Protein backbone atom coordinates (compact mmCIF):
# COMPACT_ATOMS: atom_id res chain seq x y z
CA UNK A 1 0.00 0.00 0.00
CA UNK A 2 1.38 3.38 -1.03
CA UNK A 3 0.10 6.41 0.90
CA UNK A 4 0.52 10.07 0.07
CA UNK A 5 -0.54 13.01 2.26
CA UNK A 6 -2.01 16.04 0.48
CA UNK A 7 -4.17 19.04 1.20
CA UNK A 8 -7.84 18.16 0.95
CA UNK A 9 -9.90 19.43 -1.97
CA UNK A 10 -13.66 19.84 -2.10
CA UNK A 11 -14.22 16.40 -3.64
CA UNK A 12 -12.59 14.79 -0.56
CA UNK A 13 -15.08 16.16 1.95
CA UNK A 14 -17.80 13.56 1.42
CA UNK A 15 -15.39 10.71 2.19
CA UNK A 16 -13.85 12.58 5.14
CA UNK A 17 -17.32 13.15 6.55
CA UNK A 18 -18.23 9.48 6.20
CA UNK A 19 -15.00 8.39 7.90
CA UNK A 20 -15.58 10.83 10.79
CA UNK A 21 -19.25 9.99 11.29
CA UNK A 22 -18.61 6.24 11.19
CA UNK A 23 -15.74 6.43 13.70
CA UNK A 24 -16.13 5.56 17.38
CA UNK A 25 -15.76 9.25 18.24
CA UNK A 26 -18.33 10.21 15.62
CA UNK A 27 -20.77 7.70 17.05
CA UNK A 28 -20.16 8.72 20.69
CA UNK A 29 -20.54 12.41 19.90
CA UNK A 30 -23.36 12.04 17.40
CA UNK A 31 -21.64 13.68 14.44
CA UNK A 32 -24.13 14.65 11.74
CA UNK A 33 -22.80 14.29 8.21
CA UNK A 34 -24.43 17.35 6.67
CA UNK A 35 -23.30 19.65 9.49
CA UNK A 36 -19.76 18.24 9.51
CA UNK A 37 -19.47 18.54 5.72
CA UNK A 38 -20.64 22.17 5.84
CA UNK A 39 -18.09 23.02 8.52
CA UNK A 40 -15.28 21.31 6.62
CA UNK A 41 -16.17 23.06 3.35
CA UNK A 42 -16.35 26.42 5.14
CA UNK A 43 -12.96 25.72 6.72
CA UNK A 44 -11.40 24.93 3.32
CA UNK A 45 -13.03 27.95 1.64
CA UNK A 46 -11.56 30.20 4.35
CA UNK A 47 -8.09 28.89 3.54
CA UNK A 48 -8.01 26.38 6.38
CA UNK A 49 -6.02 23.18 6.30
CA UNK A 50 -7.39 19.66 6.09
CA UNK A 51 -4.86 16.98 5.19
CA UNK A 52 -5.92 13.73 3.58
CA UNK A 53 -4.17 10.38 3.42
CA UNK A 54 -4.55 8.99 -0.08
CA UNK A 55 -4.03 5.36 -0.95
CA UNK A 56 -2.53 5.18 -4.40
CA UNK A 57 -3.40 2.19 -6.51
CA UNK A 58 -0.55 0.97 -8.69
CA UNK A 59 -0.71 0.23 -12.32
CA UNK A 60 0.92 -2.98 -13.48
CA UNK A 61 2.74 -2.64 -16.76
CA UNK A 62 1.75 -6.11 -17.90
CA UNK A 63 -1.95 -5.54 -17.24
CA UNK A 64 -4.01 -4.84 -20.36
CA UNK A 65 -4.64 -1.10 -20.71
CA UNK A 66 -8.43 -1.47 -20.37
CA UNK A 67 -7.95 -3.11 -16.93
CA UNK A 68 -5.33 -0.76 -15.53
CA UNK A 69 -6.02 1.40 -12.52
CA UNK A 70 -4.82 4.99 -12.73
CA UNK A 71 -1.74 5.17 -10.46
CA UNK A 72 -2.89 8.55 -9.12
CA UNK A 73 -6.46 7.51 -8.39
CA UNK A 74 -7.53 9.36 -5.23
CA UNK A 75 -8.83 7.13 -2.48
CA UNK A 76 -9.13 9.02 0.83
CA UNK A 77 -8.42 6.69 3.75
CA UNK A 78 -8.03 9.25 6.52
CA UNK A 79 -7.76 12.93 7.30
CA UNK A 80 -6.47 15.49 9.79
CA UNK A 81 -8.48 18.68 10.35
CA UNK A 82 -6.16 21.50 11.43
CA UNK A 83 -6.87 24.83 13.13
CA UNK A 84 -3.69 26.87 12.70
CA UNK A 85 -4.08 28.92 15.90
CA UNK A 86 -6.71 26.92 17.78
CA UNK A 87 -4.33 26.09 20.63
CA UNK A 88 -5.03 29.12 22.79
CA UNK A 89 -4.30 31.41 19.85
CA UNK A 90 -0.63 30.44 20.15
CA UNK A 91 -0.25 27.04 18.54
CA UNK A 92 -1.69 24.74 15.89
CA UNK A 93 -4.55 22.58 17.08
CA UNK A 94 -5.46 19.18 15.67
CA UNK A 95 -9.23 19.42 15.62
CA UNK A 96 -9.89 15.89 14.41
CA UNK A 97 -8.00 12.96 12.98
CA UNK A 98 -9.88 9.96 11.62
CA UNK A 99 -8.84 6.88 9.68
CA UNK A 100 -11.00 4.47 7.68
CA UNK A 101 -11.42 1.42 9.97
CA UNK A 102 -10.08 -0.93 7.29
CA UNK A 103 -6.83 1.09 7.18
CA UNK A 104 -6.18 1.50 10.91
CA UNK A 105 -3.05 0.16 12.59
CA UNK A 106 -0.91 0.36 9.44
CA UNK A 107 0.72 3.77 10.04
CA UNK A 108 -1.79 6.12 8.40
CA UNK A 109 -2.42 8.01 11.66
CA UNK A 110 1.31 8.47 12.22
CA UNK A 111 1.74 9.84 8.70
CA UNK A 112 -1.14 12.29 9.17
CA UNK A 113 0.13 13.42 12.58
CA UNK A 114 3.62 14.01 11.19
CA UNK A 115 2.15 15.93 8.23
CA UNK A 116 0.11 18.07 10.67
CA UNK A 117 3.30 18.93 12.56
CA UNK A 118 5.35 19.47 9.38
CA UNK A 119 2.75 21.79 7.81
CA UNK A 120 2.37 23.87 10.98
CA UNK A 121 5.89 23.87 12.44
CA UNK A 122 6.37 27.60 11.91
CA UNK A 123 2.87 28.62 13.00
CA UNK A 124 3.22 28.61 16.77
CA UNK A 125 4.65 27.22 19.96
CA UNK A 126 4.20 23.48 19.72
CA UNK A 127 0.99 21.56 19.01
CA UNK A 128 -2.28 20.95 20.86
CA UNK A 129 -5.14 18.50 20.61
CA UNK A 130 -7.97 17.16 22.74
CA UNK A 131 -8.59 13.47 23.27
CA UNK A 132 -11.55 11.93 25.08
CA UNK A 133 -10.69 10.26 28.38
CA UNK A 134 -12.20 6.94 27.27
CA UNK A 135 -10.09 6.80 24.09
CA UNK A 136 -7.11 5.02 25.66
CA UNK A 137 -5.81 3.78 22.31
CA UNK A 138 -5.59 7.37 21.02
CA UNK A 139 -4.01 8.59 24.27
CA UNK A 140 -1.24 5.98 23.95
CA UNK A 141 -0.82 6.86 20.25
CA UNK A 142 -0.29 10.56 21.00
CA UNK A 143 2.03 9.82 23.93
CA UNK A 144 4.19 7.62 21.65
CA UNK A 145 4.46 10.64 19.35
CA UNK A 146 5.69 13.00 22.08
CA UNK A 147 2.42 14.49 23.35
CA UNK A 148 1.79 14.86 27.08
CA UNK A 149 -1.41 15.51 28.98
CA UNK A 150 -1.34 19.05 30.36
CA UNK A 151 -4.91 19.45 31.51
CA UNK A 152 -8.46 18.19 31.48
CA UNK A 153 -11.83 19.67 30.55
CA UNK A 154 -14.72 17.78 32.17
CA UNK A 155 -18.02 17.97 30.26
CA UNK A 156 -16.43 20.33 27.70
CA UNK A 157 -17.90 18.83 24.53
CA UNK A 158 -20.44 16.42 25.97
CA UNK A 159 -21.70 15.76 29.49
CA UNK A 160 -19.97 12.83 31.12
CA UNK A 161 -16.90 12.98 28.88
CA UNK A 162 -13.65 14.60 29.93
CA UNK A 163 -11.42 15.97 27.19
CA UNK A 164 -7.73 15.63 27.93
CA UNK A 165 -5.57 18.49 26.69
CA UNK A 166 -2.47 17.09 25.00
CA UNK A 167 0.54 19.24 24.10
CA UNK A 168 3.78 18.63 22.26
CA UNK A 169 6.59 21.13 22.60
CA UNK A 170 8.55 22.02 19.46
CA UNK A 171 11.78 20.71 21.01
CA UNK A 172 10.04 17.31 21.27
CA UNK A 173 9.61 17.04 17.51
CA UNK A 174 10.64 13.70 16.06
Image: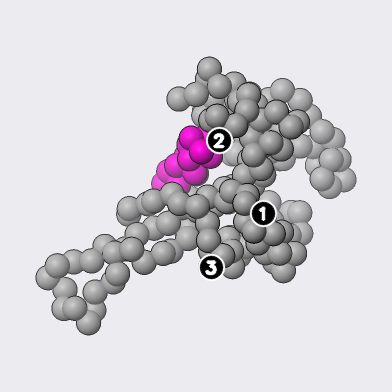
Q: Residue furthest front?
A: 46
Q: Position of residue 18 (x, y in %)?
A: 60, 65
User: Which of the pair 96/50 is nearer the observer?
Assistant: 50
Of 90 and 95, nearer the camera is: 90
Left or right side of 25 for 8 = left
For disc 3, the marked residue is 11
Residues under numbered marks 2 and 3 in contact, where contact means CB atoms less than 8 Å apart: no
* Label 1 residue SS: loop
- Seen in the picture, residue 73 relative to 83 is either above or below; the reply is below
| Residue range of the region highlighted in magenta in the rendering | 106-120
Q: CA distance from mark 3 to mark 1?
A: 16 Å
Q: Nearer the viewer, residue 138 or 91?
A: 91
Q: CA distance from mark 2 to mark 1?
A: 17 Å
Disc 1 target residue: 46
- Residue 85 visible in rendering: yes
Q: In x, y percent, where is residue 20?
A: 63, 57
Judged from this view, the residue extending furthest toward the top is 171
Residue 120's disc is 2
| One can see residue 135 in this view | no
Q: For the residues labelled 2 and 1, say whether their Cβ atoms are less than 8 Å apart.
A: no
**Which residue shows up at 18% across the image and 66% down it?**
60
Q: Nearer the observer, disc 3 or disc 1?
A: 1
- Would residue 150 be counted in the magenta stretch? no
Quadrant of residue 68 within the rendered picture: bottom left
> Which one is earlier in the sequence, the residue at label 2 or at label 1?
1
- Looking at the rendered structure, the secondary structure element under dot 2 is helix
Of residue 62 and residue 25, the one placed in the foreground of this image is: 62
Label 3, residues with CA under 10 Å away: few <14, some 14-19, many ≥20 = few
Q: Secondary structure at mark 3?
A: helix
Q: Residue furthest bottom?
A: 66
Across and down, in percent, residue 4 comes to 39, 51
Between the C-alphas of marks 2 and 3, the distance is 23 Å
Amino acid sequence: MTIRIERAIAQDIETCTRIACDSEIGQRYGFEGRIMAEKMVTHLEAGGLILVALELESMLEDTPKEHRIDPLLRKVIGFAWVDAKGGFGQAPYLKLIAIDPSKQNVGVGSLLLKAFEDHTRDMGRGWFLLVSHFNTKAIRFYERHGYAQVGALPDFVKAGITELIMYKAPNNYA
